[in-house]
Amino acid sequence: MSFILTAIIMFGFWMFLSGELGIIFIISAVVSSLIVAYISHDLLIGKTDIRSGFSNLLRLIRYVPWLIWQVILANLDLVYRTLHPSMPIEPLMIKFDSKLKTDTGITILANSITLTPGTVTVKADRNGEFMVHALARGPAESLLEGTMQAKVRKIEGSEEKRNV
Amino acid sequence: MVDTALAADIGWMDVKTVITGICLVIGCFFIIVASIGIIRFPDFYSRIHPAGKTDTLGQSMVLIGLMVYEGFSLVSVKLLIIIIFIFIANPTATHALANAAYVAGLKPWQKGDRRK
């Protein structure tokens, strides 16, 4: 079931991107979407429930504007630290437990940390424990305040059980 | 009548070109600063910061500029898909690099250490 669904989605995506209707294009579309579906059908559809996945997607879309604003702040901060003559950096490693349960939540938090001011995720494991490299003390403290973690936990929402 | 329509058309093209130019300049600025940062920062972990973050915004700004120039068409939808891909793939790749360095046992640079 997930194999066929993935193949159809991949085929549709191919047709959308190429826009060609020649016979050779259609044949290569079918062949490559079947290959991709064979390799990755359990990744795209997986075991997630479609309906909860959809409401999670809506919450994720509401999270994105805030993230983009954070990305802009991150870049201005980094530009300042890079171009300042004395280069005000003081790298440190911090560890914390994010208390997130699902793979989706952990992935979103890890990516958000990497995108936001002065912090890069070094290690993130399934238990929600994070190790972060911060470029200075300020960014590390603002991460430990936990605003972002609360927002990601809201996205995680009702999806209580761990996807293994 | 025809003349005013033509003038309005030219004015719109100008606005579009100017916005495109601004986006491209901002994007190039971020990419150049990222390159400077990669050279100036002291160790591997801190060099990942400009490489992973500033590139994301720089590339996105360049692509957004191209989207504005193209207007609403299939090409700009494809560019939007590329931007979404960059926003997911770039932090993931950065994390993969940092994690590989950590697993290999590289110690982060502390303030006061000699610069490598």
Image (spheres, grey):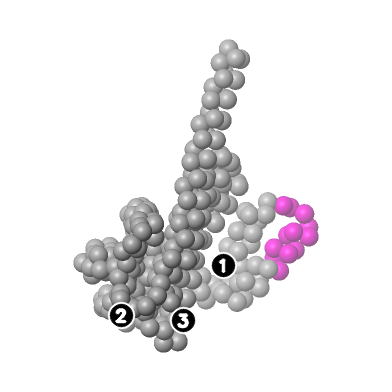
Question: Position of A47 compared to A14: left or right?
Answer: left
Instruction: Name the chain under label 3.
Output: B
Residue hosting label 2: A129
Which mark's residue is nearer the viewer, 2 or 1? 2
- Name the chain under label 2: A
Discs 3/1, front: 3
In magenta stretch: residue A23: yes
Specify whether residue B100 is painted magenta: no
Q: Amino acid at mark 3?
A: Ala
Span of residues in magenta: A20-31
Quarter of the image that includes the N terminus of chain A: bottom right
Amino acid on which disc 2 is placed:
Glu
Image check: A141 left or right of B79? Answer: left
Where's residue A146, x and y in %? 23, 67
Residue behind mark 3: B100
Same chain, labels 3 and 1:
no
Q: Residue at x 33, y 62 (%)?
A: A86
Mark 3, Cα crowd under 10 Å, few <14 / some 14-19 / many 20+, is some
Give how far across and how far down residue A19 sits, in percent.
68, 51
Q: Disc 2 to disc 1, how far (Cα)?
A: 34 Å
Local secondary structure at mark 3: helix
Question: Is residue A3 something one can see in this rendering?
Answer: yes
Helix, strand or loop status at disc 1 = helix
**Location of the C terminus of chain A (image quadrant):** bottom left
How far, Cα to Cα, is label 3 from label 1? 35 Å
Disc number placed over residue A5 in the picture, else none: 1
Q: Is residue B91 above or below residue A68?
A: below
Residue B102 coordinates in the image, percent (x, y): 41, 83
Q: Nearer the viewer, residue A5 or A153?
A: A153
Q: Is residue B78 above or below residue B37?
A: above
Residue type, numbered disc 1: Leu
